[in-house]
Image: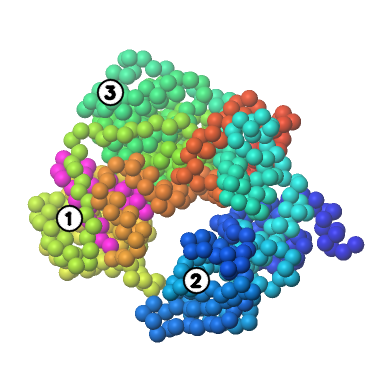
Amino acid sequence: MDSRTEAKQVYPTLAMPVRYIKGVGPTRAKAFERLGIKTVADLLEYFPRDWAFAPQCTTIDRLTPGQTATIKGQIISVDYQAFRRVPLMEVIICDQTGSCRLIWFHGGFLRERLIPGQTIVVCGKVESYRYQLQMVNPRFVLYDRDGQIDPSELLSGPIYPACAGLANHVIKRTIHQALDQLGHLVEEFFEPGFLKENDLIDRRLAFEWIHRPQDRAMVDAALRRLKFDELFLMQAGLAIRRYHVQHSATARAMKWSPQIDARIRRRFPFELTEDQQQVIEQIISDMSRPVPMNRLLQGDVGSGKTVVALYAALLAVANKGQVAIMAPTEILAQQHFESIERFLQGSRVRRVLLTGGISGTKRRQITSMIKRGQMDIVVGTVALLEEDVEFADLTLVIIDEQHKFGVAQKGGLRKDFTPHCLVMTATPIPRTLAMTAFGDLDVSVIRHCPPGRGQVVTRLVDTGQRERAYDFIRAQLKAGRQAYFVYPRISNAQTDTALKAATEQYQVLAREVFPDFRVGLLHGQMSSKDKQRIMSPFRSGSLHVLVSTIVIEVGLDVPNATVMVIEDADQFGLAQLHQLRGRIGRGAARSYCLLFANTDNELARQRLEIMTSCNDGFQIAEHDLRLRGPGELFSTRQHGLPDLKIADIAQDYDLLMLARRAAFTLIEHDPYLRQPPHQAIRRALLERFGQRIGLVDVA
């Protein structure tokens, strides 16, 4: 018994290593591994990036101008005409019925491939040029077959993302081998009635049609089924996680009364907006139940999320519970704490700030008070996750900019407790992404900002306008305003790049551009003490220009800062640009965001033009999702979600909704997937997700 026969007996599943497929072996298996393909299952889910369908092969005498045709002929002559304004490769082929001219513009790369005497199969649109038939830039393949198949098949079928050592035809042949050997092991998830009702083909047939389609209709049917399955499994994983939070954990029900409400509202020296009122009602409803609240609060920059979060915190404190508020950076944690201090001045609510920069005796004193229940609200960073931080009665966790924390970090804050949880983000999230990255959360949205905010004007500044822009900024500084200068990197000392960096440009701005003003430098590699040394005078107004990296992306609230300059703005995504722009316009004065960019990249220019014409964060988020995909807004790995291989949440919204309804209905009726018809789904979920999104083994 050879090793391959033995392997088939040992691995009679889709988990069989790809090396045991006929024609692969150890060397080619390594090439497949570079494509992320280790098993047969990986191979079957290595989907084509496109499909080509060539008409059945015909003879040259049957060609008519305007049709798309496939012909086979012998190369008679090859002429590369490099002297033309647009160089071209001209090839004449003939069969027993006539001749045809083939043209490839800029076709010099074909000089070594196309040689007189070879047999070639080509597919393209037929034209007539000076009474001669021709095809321009046709697809082709050199023909060395024995005539047993129609030559058009060589130009038809899937086109795969290839790599060195694995040409398209090798990948295609290997996948066909896998389908022939093990395709019958693909498991069906759904009953025939469900498939018919939702216009879905059989799952095994979908894999067959995606890799061996005969026409575009087969491709479309296969895509619909496989996209649905991918979205369904994602939503089922989220539904399981949500179910276990709601049914396996209990939380303290918070009592609410008009008296408590009045005491809390007295802390806010303004009327809450209609959006804020609505979200507070949702939070009160959640926290009044003995099930942990698991709510996402999203709102554009400056929309007033902090006030809503503080209402929730004070409701918990009114019920004698403790609150933890966690921010991703010390700057943002400090900002939250100072904001809370302003609202709670003179209050009996006990609050404290705990960050990584606090150590020694002071830290021990703080952690001791937290453990004894002598602190009501604790604001901090990831320092709240450390072992020495124990709460006496943690009833509410508030996590700001929660996409910047990993799954393990967010779970770590809860420790042995089951508090209510409110997570917030100032990055507006498209509805499709909210149902994937945050699909296990209830979602609240604050769409409108409180009145009194200044207008923000955004302009794209090209290289030739830089000095004029500097003059404008000087005028703003002389008028008593402040400015941010943001750079994509801290330093260029270790890199060879044309991008501007904060540390080098800080020197230029301080000495050459704004020598009459105080300029400060802030970046993520600075110590907590140094950050505070810079931020305090900037908040007070004695520091005029703050040179920084994206460390200021969230949280800073300096109403007097009315100018934001973003250098090499084409290096940032739309969501990030919008976040940065949110640092200005926080006072009543008009503010200005200047995007400095020197790029000819069409996509980058398109993103920047969107920024100049739109201030609505939700519209910008939708644009960003379409242009750059979900990774720009949030890393799916941050949420334990696998990357989507075939579905596109920006394009497949209707299919996502269908999959979500089916998944949540299934988990509601069979949350542990114990029923026999659901075993294939259970196996697929455990294989696909494991513990990455907190999916427990539901055996």
* Front one among 174 and 358: 174
Whether the residues at callouts 1 and 2 have beta carbons within 8 Å, the answer is no
Sequence order check, earlier mark of 3 and 1: 3
Q: Is there CB contact under 8 Å for labels 3 and 1?
A: no
Part of the protein shown in magenta: 573-597
Residue 350, position as x, y percentages in the image: 35, 30
* Quadrant for the C terminus in the image: top right
Amino acid at the residue labelled 1:
His
N-terminal label among 2 and 3 = 2
Residue tagged 2: 134
Measured Cα–Cα span from mark 2 to mark 3:
79 Å
The quadrant of the image that shows the N terminus is bottom right
SS at badge 2: strand
Residue drawn at point x = 48 percent, y = 20 percent:
289
Q: Earlier in the sequence, mark 1 or mark 2?
A: 2
471 relative position to 649: left or right = left
Q: Is residue 328 left or right of residue 595?
A: right
What residue does disc 1 label?
Answer: 544
Farthest residue, direction bottom = 83
Distance between mark 1 and mark 2 Cα atoms: 68 Å
Instruction: Please check the rendered image and state whether residue 238 is part of the magenta-colored stretch, yes or no.
Output: no
Residue 522 seen: no
Looking at the rendered structure, the kind of residue marked 2 is: Gln
| Residue 455, image x, y percentages | 19, 43
The amino acid on which the numbered mark 3 sits, given as a three-letter code, is Arg
Q: Residues within 10 Å of mark 2 (few under 14, many from 20)?
A: many
Is 195 left, or right, of 347 in this rendering? right
Secondary structure under tag 3 reads: helix
Give the residue at mark 3: 265
